[in-house]
Amino acid sequence: MASEDCIFCKIVKGESPSWKIIENDKALGVLDIYPGVEGHCLIIPKRHVPYWLDLSDAETVIVFNTAKIVAKRIEKVFKSDFVCVFIRGGRVKHTHLVLFPSYKSDKLSGFPQSVLGTAEVDFDKLQEKLRVR
């Protein structure tokens, strides 16, 4: 169900302007209107889903396959070394994948440690906490 105050729901319904780059029955790809770099794109599931873990399995496959198509296009157009992908849903409470070209020498090299540093971790305890059984 769409959220009436969600900008991404408005974009999906055509009520807010966007620069579409790909569309299918479950996802929409648009240019980010506040790009960090040229080629910064968003892949938005058409259904209003605030947190990406709540996407259905079918939606997850389509959204990520759509992102893969766009990532390959970004890589080709910008001749990038990488295409960074982040999954968001923070500032805008609607899941979206953020894609943009990245290069070996840019500020994202080494992310997230380059921004966050390296945490001290007891790997044995953490493995036990996170192990999927």
Image (tube, rainbow, N blue to C red):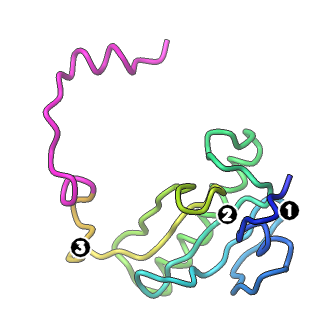
The numbered mark, 2 or 3, whose residue comes first in the sequence reads 2
Q: Nearer the viewer, mark 1 or mark 3?
A: 3
The answer to whether 56 appears left or right of 98 in the picture is right
Q: Are marks 2 and 1 in contact (CB under 8 Å)?
A: no
Residue drawn at x 75%, y 48% as measured from the top left: 59
Identify which amino acid the numbered label 3 is placed on: Lys
Q: Secondary structure at mark 3?
A: loop
Start and end of the magenta stretch?
112-133
- Binning the other alpha carbons within 10 Å of mark 1 as few (below 14), some (14 to 19) or many (20 upward) gives few
Residue 107 located within the stretch drawn in magenta: no
Give the side of residue 25 with respect to residue 72, left or right.
right
Label 1 residue SS: loop
Question: In the picture, residue 62 is in which quadrant?
Answer: bottom right
Distance Cα–Cα, label 1 vs label 3: 35 Å
Looking at the picture, how far across and down is residue 6, in whole percent? 73, 65
Residue 122 covered by magenta stretch: yes
Q: CA distance from mark 2 to mark 1?
A: 11 Å
Q: Is residue 40 above or below residue 111?
A: below
- Sooner in the amino-acid sequence: mark 1 or mark 3: 1
Extreme residue in the front direction: 5
Q: Name which residue lies at 62% across and 46% down.
A: 52
Please name the residue that numbered disc 3 is placed on. 107
Which residue is under mark 1?
A: 25
Q: Which residue is mark 2?
A: 66
